[in-house]
Structure formats: C-alpha cells, structure tokens
C-alpha cells in the first residue's frame, strides 16, 4: 500500500488539471465562486432539461482560465431548472411501507373496545438534489442516459421519501447542463448550491464534468456524490491526499489498476508485436493514463509509442498516424472523445494504418458513436462498465440490469447505453438519507456518506467501510470502486441494432460472465 501511495503521489506532479494546463492549487487555497456572466441556453428536445450558458469565461492574460480564477469567478448564477413541469413539489416514494402507527389502547365501553386508525409518517421539509450532466457539447452522448436516469429518479421519489428522521420529505430533482465545459460545470454547480439551496449535488459524465463540480462543492461545503471519473483522475487529479481526504466530496468508479489489467487481458488475446500506439489528450484524464500506463506496459512486455499530448477537439491526426505507421504499431489505444475517435479512425483507415487491436476508452461506451463509424467500428474494444448481463439489481426498484436496459430501449427508442450506470448516484443519495436522522445536519450527512456500505446497487456492491488497500475497490478514502470489464463491438448481421457488445474479459470483474474471446481486426 505504501509503495502504491508513493507512486500515485508522484503521479500528482505529472497530471495537468482542466482548463489552463497548470497544476491545481492546494485544496485549502480554493475559494467559492461569486459571480459569472451567463446567457440563455438552447432548449433541449427533452423538456425536462434546460440550461444557461456562460457568454465568456473570464480569462488570464494568455486567454486561459486558471483553477483558482475559475473557482473565484465561475459564478453562482447558475439558476437551475427543475426536471419537468411541476417538479418543485416532487415527493419521494422510498420506504413506502414504513409508517408510524398510533394506537389509543383498548377502552371498555358498552359499545365494545375501540382503537384509533394508523397514521402515516409526519411530513418533513422539502429536500433538493441537484444533478449536473453533459447534455450538450462533445460529451452529449452521456446525457442521453442521464435524462433517462433523472426520469426514473423522479418517478421513484413521486410519493415521499422517508428519511432516518422518520419523516416523509418531498424531494425536488434539479438538473443542469454542463454543456461539456469545465467552467460551465462549476458555474451551474454553484447556482445549485447558492440559488437552488440543494441539499446534495450529484454529477456524472467524465472528469470534465465531475471534477469541477466536486471542486466547487468542496470549496462551498456542500455534500457532493458523483460517478464516472477514474479514481486517479478524480482524487489525485484534484490534489487529493489520502492522509487528508476531502470532506464534502465522495465518488464511485474504478481505477487505473483495473483498467490496465483489463486492457492487457484484451490485448493478450491477439498475437501482435506488442507495439502500442497511444492517444492521450492534454487533459486530466489523458495525463492520468500517461502517468500510470508506461511502467505497466513495460512490465507486460509492451512497447509504448506516444502520439503526443494534443488538445481536444482535434480534426487532424495525420502526425500521429504517420508516427504509428513508421513504428509498426499493431495495437492502438486512447482515451478519446467520440468526435475525435471518428476523425482518427477514419483517417487511419484512409492512410493505411491497420492495427490488429484497437481499444478506445470513451467512444466505445455509446452505440451512437459506433454507428457513426459505420462498418469501421466492427471489432473495436473498450473498457466497459455496464451490460445487460450484469448480475446486479437496483436497490430502489429491484430491477435487474437487463430489465433496466429493456426499459431504456422502450422509453428512448434506442439501444441501451452504459451510462445507465449513473443511476447508482441517486441510489446512494437515498441510502444516505434513509440513515440520516437530521437532514439539516451536513456533518451527520457526510458521516453517513463515509459509512456507506450498500450490498446491492445497479452498479454492484458499493463499500466505503472496507480497509484501504492497493488493488481493491477502496484504494483511497473518498472513492469506492465498481465493476469494469472488457468488451468488443461487433456488427450484428441483421440484428435489431447495428452493433452488439460482447463481454470478452472479466480480469478485473470476475462476477461478470465472459461471452466470447477477442477477435482481431480484419
């Protein structure tokens, strides 16, 4: 464990935070935002979602926004819009069979014994849960499942949430669009805190959304529960210190040991020269991979060919492709946004770069991104974190992963998507509130968050009480892991959808059944 912490502490110095490429200041140097210029945002197709966009982010002399400026200037003016019409009075249906019964006791009269009727729980104050997601912009594919999750949360809390105080509380869910922008994510999080007075802030959809929201909440002393950012990107990318953990911000997702084990398990199934072309962008995600992977590749006998740190989005990858061809790379991997993946892979094929194995971290999450590639997507690999075959159930409704995927397809009229897993963040909120005896005591709320031990969620068991140890689901205090497997997309050949996703490795998730071995690219 000590060796691992020494390793990751060195990683912190090599990571580049969001926005301006400079390292983040220490956590105690962060300040809450105070003011931010915003403009009216576009309406979403789903009326449950609206957002306001900033006119222009305050800039430093070189046109970039530093993390410190970002927290000082990113504005609390993110007036959030409630999910759907009339959400201000939504009530939650948690523990519907819990009730307080008052019995007057038997009274002997000529009419016989009488008792009073049972009464329901006392009404509690309204609770507000804010949710920040990428509904538009480069990461908008995440928001499709996000809108589904929020719809399901709304339904679950439609009839009252009985918390640990024994009272049934109305619940309002307020959704804001990060627009796939880090400054915007922080701005709307501030608005949810200061304007909407949310009791919890939740967020999902990669470090670009999760990290700035968590930073804002940590600076403003607001409980924040998030999902979907690798442990190292979330914790060490925010200057986390295992000896001095964050107070207000906790997270669920896997870490680099799991994703690297998963990658090697996939690559090893195909006979290659073990030369790996890598595409790691100039952001906190890309630099977390760049800091962790090289030594691990060397240990497994792979030679890394780094295409260089590049800025997202990117229209041309000619330089990288020429390098990879010259070095004879037969494996390519990258943590790359869907539009860039389409550009790179299309250009690679046009320029005659034909590796035997291709693994992309973000675009392989989404059927739409695969379909955008046409037949070029056949055989692409990726680290995956949700699948209909997951042996897990919702702690709220008891639905299986398969039932939830089927429900998503029916409601959205499209193929199921892995970010359905974001549903777990509200399961977590409900679990915490059920154990909280005073919903106005933020200290008690955070104590219950740190004590979370959920044996079953749609993402599997979530346990923050397990001992801290390397290569476990609990490596650092503020993060608990969930399952990660290796999958391959294949043309469905006349199926309901263009592509099907097959589980090809469970090296990091033995509870997930393997469906087939990796097939090399044609």
Image (cartoon, grey):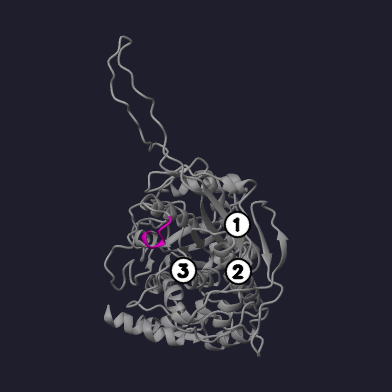
Binning the other alpha carbons within 10 Å of mark 3 as few (below 14), some (14 to 19) or many (20 upward) gives some
Q: In which quarter of the image is the N terminus?
A: bottom left
**CB under 8 Å between discs 2 and 1:** no
Q: Which of marks 2 and 1 is in front?
A: 2
- Report the magenta stretch's main SS: helix
> Above or below — where is 7 with respect to 365?
below
Query: Which residue occupies the foreground of this view, 484 or 223?
Result: 223
Q: Which residue position holds label 1? A: 144
Q: Which of 319 and 93 is in front in this view?
A: 93
- SS for callout 1: helix
Bin the neighbour count of mark 1 within 10 Å (Cα to Cα): few under 14, some 14-19, many 20 and up.
Answer: some
Q: Quadrant of the C terminus?
A: bottom right
Q: Real-space Cα distance between discs 1 and 3?
A: 30 Å
Q: For residue 78, which quarter of the picture?
A: bottom right
Q: What stretch is highlighted in magenta?
A: 440-444
Residue furthest out toward the front: 109
Kindly tell me whether residue 10 is visible in this rendering: yes
Q: Name the residue under label 2.
A: 76
Q: Nearer the viewer, mark 1 or mark 3?
A: 3
């Amino acid at each position: 464990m000590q060796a691992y912490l020494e390793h990751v502490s060195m990683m912190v110095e090599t990571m580049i935070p969001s926005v301006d490429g400079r390292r983040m200041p220490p956590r105690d140097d962060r300040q809450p935002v105070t003011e931010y210029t915003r403009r009216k945002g576009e309406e979403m197709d789903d009326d449950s979602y609206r957002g306001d966009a900033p006119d222009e982010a305050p800039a430093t002399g070189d046109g970039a926004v530093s993390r410190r400026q970002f927290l000082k200037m990113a504005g609390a003016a993110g007036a959030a819009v409630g999910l759907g019409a009339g959400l201000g009075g939504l009530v939650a249906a948690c523990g519907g069979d819990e009730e307080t019964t008052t019995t007057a006791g038997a009274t002997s009269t000529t009419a016989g014994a009488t008792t009073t009727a049972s009464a329901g729980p006392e009404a509690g104050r309204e609770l507000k849960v804010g949710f920040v997601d990428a509904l538009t912009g480069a990461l908008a594919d995440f928001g499709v499942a996000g809108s589904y999750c929020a719809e399901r949360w709304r339904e679950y809390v439609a009839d009252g949430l009985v918390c640990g105080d024994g009272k049934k509380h109305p619940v309002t869910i307020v959704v804001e669009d990060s627009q796939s922008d880090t400054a915007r994510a922080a701005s709307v999080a501030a608005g949810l805190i200061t304007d909407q007075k949310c009791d919890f802030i939740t967020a999902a959809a990669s470090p670009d959304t999760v990290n700035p929201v968590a930073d804002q909440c940590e600076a403003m002393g607001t409980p924040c529960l998030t999902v979907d950012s690798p442990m190292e990107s979330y914790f060490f990318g925010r200057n986390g210190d295992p000896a001095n953990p964050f107070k207000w911000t906790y997270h669920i997702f896997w870490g680099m040991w799991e994703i690297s084990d998963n990658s090697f398990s996939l690559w090893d199934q195909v006979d290659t020269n073990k030369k790996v072309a890598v595409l790691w962008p100039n952001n906190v995600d890309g630099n977390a991979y760049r800091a962790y992977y090289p030594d691990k590749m060397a240990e497994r006998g792979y030679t890394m060919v780094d295409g260089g740190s590049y800025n997202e989005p990117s229209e041309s990858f000619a330089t990288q492709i020429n390098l990879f061809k010259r070095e004879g790379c037969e494996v390519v991997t990258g943590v790359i946004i869907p539009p860039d993946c389409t550009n790179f892979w299309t250009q690679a094929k046009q320029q005659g770069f034909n590796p035997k194995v291709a693994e992309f971290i973000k675009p392989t999450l989404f059927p739409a991104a695969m379909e955008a590639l046409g037949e070029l997507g056949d055989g692409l690999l990726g680290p995956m974190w949700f699948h209909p075959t997951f042996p897990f159930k919702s702690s709220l409704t008891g639905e299986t992963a398969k039932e939830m995927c089927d429900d998503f397809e029916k409601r959205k009229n499209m193929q199921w998507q892995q970010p359905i897993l974001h549903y777990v963040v509200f399961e977590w909120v409900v679990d915490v509130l059920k154990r909280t005896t005073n919903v106005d005591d933020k200290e008690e709320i955070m104590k219950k968050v740190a004590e979370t031990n959920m044996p079953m969620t749609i993402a599997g068991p979530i346990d923050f009480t397990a001992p801290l140890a390397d290569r476990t689901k609990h490596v650092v205090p503020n993060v608990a892991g969930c399952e990660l497997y290796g999958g391959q997309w294949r043309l469905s050949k006349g199926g309901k959808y263009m592509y099907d996703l097959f589980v090809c490795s469970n090296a990091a998730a033995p509870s997930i059944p393997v469906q087939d071995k990796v097939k090399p690219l044609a």
